[in-house]
Image (spheres, rainbow, N blue to C red):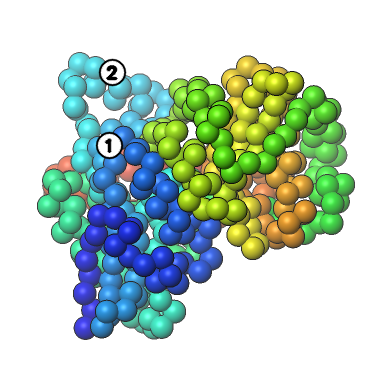
């Protein structure tokens, strides 16, 4: 007999049984545990579990937080809501329960291979039901499923749409197959204009010194300052990362997460947090001095550094993450679409939010 429950710490679940449901996930048990321990403000962590005769057959990370509706808006609509909030504090600020992690690339749904395809919508429905009961008990009115990747969307549709959720486009995931023998082979795949531009941008690379590290305690204050500058410029900002996140992820994950630090002389000008497994390198965050980083073309230097790491380590795929899609497409990436599913427990507010959902869609490829 299956039973769905919600726990408040990943430590309540065994690492082996959790990771068995996520065999291809770079952001597995240790990554999520590092996030849990990082002390992100205003987040309460939840983990939704479905067991069958004691065996874990489905699981997903989840969270509770406060969500301001302008978080995923840009342009005039964002400014209008922000202005209204200044007049009426708390306006359009909702208690949100989300499946997924604010610090992970996708929704993070794991289902045991032994669960038949025909049974999966029912199992996921049971997981959603437990998630909603827990969310209501915490006073959350808005329920969301964050960044379901396209290969899983038929399953999410089957389980979530009958429960009143609406799907809308979210930020796609960029990835680049390492199907070349060296950097020259990669450059040869680009257009003439992109190839010429990259060679020009990389002329500054000899000015930089790089260090690959798992311990950044001595520079974490500078990395946090770079992060705050990046976050202040961002169109959309949801989670607020901490020093404990930047130091804790590589510490918890051992050799599967590390920083590449960039120095000009003795001055730190940037850092790139990376996660890898046997086949893939995932770029989590590139942080840089807002003035010197741009002058040194650090975004593009780090791109080629990471491709070099893929080649050295025999990796087959580079995932540079979300945002900056124009550059990523120009540099040869393909995109995998993702979707957010949401509903509000208040019928009237749910109808209004679903009617205006297109304003909140974040898919730049639409």
Q: Residue at x 17, y 42 (%)?
A: 349
The one nearer the camera, 203 or 358, is 203
Q: Residue at x 79, y 30 (%)?
A: 205
Please tell me whether mark 2 sits on a helix, a strand or a loop: helix
Residue 83: numbered disc: 2
Badge 2 local density, few (<14 within 10 Å), some, or many (20+)? few
> Residue 52's x, y, as percent?
27, 80
Badge 1 local density, few (<14 within 10 Å), some, or many (20+)? few
> Residue 165's x, y, as percent?
27, 56
Q: Quadrant of residue 192?
A: top right
Instruction: Say if residue 179 shows up in the picture.
Output: yes
Q: Quadrant of residue 92?
A: top left
Instruction: Say if residue 144 shows up in the picture.
Output: no
148 sits left or right of 320 in the view: left
- Residue indicated by mark 1: 42
How far apart are the alpha carbons under marks 2 and 1?
A: 23 Å
The one nearer the camera, 175 or 22, is 22
Q: Which of marks 2 and 1 is nearer the N terminus?
A: 1
Please tell me whether mark 1 sits on a helix, a strand or a loop: loop
């Amino acid at each position: 007999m299956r039973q769905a429950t919600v726990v408040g710490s990943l430590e309540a679940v065994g690492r082996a049984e959790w990771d068995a449901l996520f065999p291809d996930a770079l952001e597995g048990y240790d990554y999520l545990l590092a996030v849990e321990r990082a002390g992100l403000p205003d987040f309460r962590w939840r983990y939704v579990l479905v067991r069958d005769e004691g065996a874990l057959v489905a699981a997903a990370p989840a969270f509770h937080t406060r969500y301001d509706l302008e978080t995923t808006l840009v342009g005039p609509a964002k400014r209008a809501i922000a202005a209204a909030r200044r007049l009426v504090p708390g306006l359009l600020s909702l208690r949100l329960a989300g499946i997924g992690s604010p610090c992970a690339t996708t929704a993070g749904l794991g289902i045991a291979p032994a669960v038949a395809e025909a049974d999966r919508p029912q199992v996921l429905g049971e997981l959603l039901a437990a998630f909603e009961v827990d969310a209501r008990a915490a006073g959350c009115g808005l329920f969301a499923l964050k960044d379901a990747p396209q290969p899983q969307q038929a399953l999410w549709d089957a389980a979530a749409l009958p429960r009143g959720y609406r799907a809308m486009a979210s930020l796609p995931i960029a990835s680049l197959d390492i199907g070349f023998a060296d950097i020259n082979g990669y450059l040869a795949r680009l257009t003439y204009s992109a190839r010429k531009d990259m060679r020009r941008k990389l002329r500054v690379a000899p000015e930089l010194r790089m260090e690959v590290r798992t311990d950044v305690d001595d520079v974490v204050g500078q990395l946090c300052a770079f992060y705050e500058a990046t976050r202040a410029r961002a169109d959309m900002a949801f989670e607020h990362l901490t020093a404990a996140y930047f130091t804790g992820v590589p510490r918890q994950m051992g050799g599967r997460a590390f920083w590449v630090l960039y120095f000009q002389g003795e001055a730190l000008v940037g850092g790139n947090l990376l996660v890898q497994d046997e086949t893939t390198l995932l770029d989590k965050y590139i942080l840089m001095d807002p003035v010197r980083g741009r002058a040194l073309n650090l975004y593009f230097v780090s791109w080629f550094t990471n491709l070099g790491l893929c080649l050295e380590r025999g990796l087959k795929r580079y995932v540079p993450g979300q945002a900056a899609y124009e550059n990523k497409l120009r540099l040869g990436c393909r995109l995998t679409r993702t979707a957010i599913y949401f509903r509000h427990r208040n019928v009237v507010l749910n109808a209004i939010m679903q009617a205006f959902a297109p304003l909140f869609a974040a898919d730049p490829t639409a």
